[in-house]
Image (tube, rainbow, N blue to C red):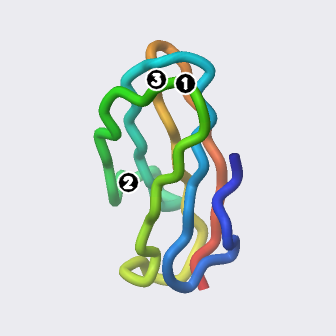
Amino acid sequence: SQNYPNPASGVTKIAIESIEAASYTLNITDLSGRVIDSRDLGRLDAGRHIETIDASTYAPGVYFYTVFSAGHQSTKKFIVE
């Protein structure tokens, strides 16, 4: 799901909808594709999970976050003010 709030100036939350138990990783990249944050979220059970990101440490701009699991990935854009 899309992070909220977006645009973010402090803490933003990313909802991860898992249809089955699996191991997850979250990467945040800048516009140049450089990974600025990578988190091993471990094994998540099926259901909704929330990951909190402190975006106040990021420079203002456009970023992308990608959630990876067992052959699947989902990428969304977010803005930091």
Above or below for 38 versus 23: below
Residue at 46% across, 26% down: 45
Please tell me in which quadrant of the rendered image residue 29 appears: bottom left
Query: Could you classify mark 1 by the number of other residues whose Cα lies within 10 Å: few (under 14), some (14-19), or many (20 or more)?
Result: few
Above or below for 6 versus 57: above
Residue at 45% across, 15% down: 70
Q: For the residues marked 1 and 2, what is the alpha-carbon distance in whole angstroms? A: 30 Å
Pointer 1 residue = 46
Q: Amino acid at mark 3?
A: Ser
Callout 2: SS: loop
The answer to the question of whether label 1 and label 2 lie on touching residues, with beta carbons closer than 8 A, is no
Residue at 36% across, 52% down: 35
Q: 29 or 74, which is in the foreground?
A: 74
The answer to the question of whether label 1 and label 3 lie on touching residues, with beta carbons closer than 8 A, is no
Q: Is residue 60 left or right of residue 23?
A: right
Pointer 3 residue = 69
The answer to the question of whether label 2 and label 3 lie on touching residues, with beta carbons closer than 8 A, is no
Picture coordinates of residue 67, whole percent (x, y): 50, 37
Above or below for 69 versus 17: above
Q: Nearer the viewer, mark 2 or mark 3?
A: 3
Sequence-earlier tag: 1 or 3:
1
Sequence-earlier tag: 1 or 2:
2
Pointer 2 residue = 34
Residue at 62% across, 21% down: 19
Callout 1: SS: loop
Q: Nearer the viewer, mark 1 or mark 3?
A: 1
Q: Is residue 35 left or right of residue 77?
A: left
